[in-house]
Image (cartoon, rainbow, N blue to C red):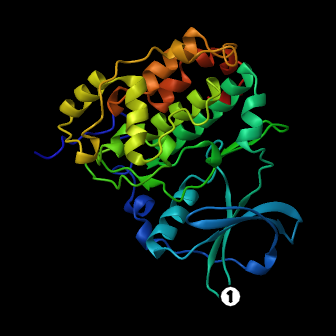
Amino acid sequence: MPAEPSVSKVYADVNNNKPKSWWDYETVQVQWQNPEHYEIIKKLGRGKYSEVFQGVNLEDHSKIVIKVLKPVKKKKIKREIKILQNLNNGPFIIRLLAIVKDPLSKTPSLISEHVNNVDFRTLYPTLSDYDIRFYMYDLLTALDFCHSQGIMHRDVKPHNVMIDPIEKKLRLIDWGLAEFYHPGTEYNVRVASRYFKGPELLVDYRYYDYSLDLWSFGAMLASIIFKKEPFFHGKSNTDQLVQIVRVLGTDELNTYLERYNIQLGPEYEDLGIYSKRPWFRFSNTNNQHLVNNEVIDLFENLLRYDHNERLTAREAINHQWFDLVRNDKPKTEI
């Protein structure tokens, strides 16, 4: 029996209601700009698909980031470019400034705005309760915006959230795995990073939607609040589901599998039986100043097996845990 298809409860028809040129990234015509305007200064990091450098715009001497793309299918590069262009003035979303190509190697690079980021391993332990609410509100605002434009990020994790604590500036970066949402489409489950993969990916359920990003967001928030990095620490993709089941319980997993007619693979034969653990159990002397009824309620409603039961980004923004910061935000961001 095939799995039961599912449709997002929000923004399901965004792409159907937009012209084909909005989402048909294979036809995108890239406007290449002059690479001589930019110079590499130092390496910032590398990922599976790119190397990232700090650079300078030689025309105005402003700091920039240069993302040099590794050889991948042209289609994937076009998708990332199209998504960045579509989202370019969105709140808390990294701005694409230019696209250039090395004249010799023909390697494409994306030039984007620079954020004076502090590594999350250093930054997160220093954040106050208020700071956490402040930045998570901005991250949800970015997610609600991209979802409202018909786009799933599919790789939400601390490494892709740049924060400058001096300027109090947050940017959601790395749209290389992002994809347009079309209801009824079966998507690749090999997305997101292991610790932030939603249960749907781990049980090979392909009809997922924007709600995947809300699981990743919830897993990230749990690691910050409970000071447990990462919160779900699987040694493999199979073990990742085991770590989730040890918190959310076996009964709830079985209900979810039955609802969508999902068959678990043979690798999960020895899954074991676990009861649901109350979120308060993760509170200790190290994190109790951050743990309260409101944030527990937020976890209860984000970290759910059933993607359709999770809060949407907009619903999460309106959650009472954010009341403290909502009044301090400019109305344009809300």
- Quarter of the image with the C terminus in it: top right
- Quarter of the image with the N terminus in it: top left
Residue 54 can be seen, yes or no: yes
Q: Which residue lies furthest to the left in this view?
A: 1
Which corner quadrant of the image does residue 286 belong to?
Answer: top right
> Looking at the picture, which amino acid does disc 1 mark?
Pro
Q: Residues within 10 Å of mark 1 (few under 14, many from 20)?
A: few
* Residue depicted at x 69% and y 20%: 325
Name the residue carrying label 1.
Answer: 103
Query: Would you say 52 lies left or right of 80 here?
Result: right
Q: Give how far across and how far down residue 265 sits, in percent.
A: 24, 46
Q: Residue furthest right?
A: 61
Query: Would you say 90 lies left or right of 243 here?
Result: right
Q: Residue furthest bottom?
A: 104
Query: Would you say 300 lies left or right of 119 here?
Result: left
Q: Give how far across and how far down residue 133 sits, in percent.
A: 66, 24
Query: Would you say 24 lies left or right of 35 here?
Result: left
* Residue depicted at x 18% and y 40%: 4
Which corner quadrant of the image does residue 269 belong to?
Answer: top left
* Residue depicted at x 57% and y 58%: 84
Q: Give how far across and how far down residue 147 sits, in percent.
A: 47, 42
Q: Which of 99 and 189 is in front in this view?
A: 189
Residue 13 can be seen, yes or no: no
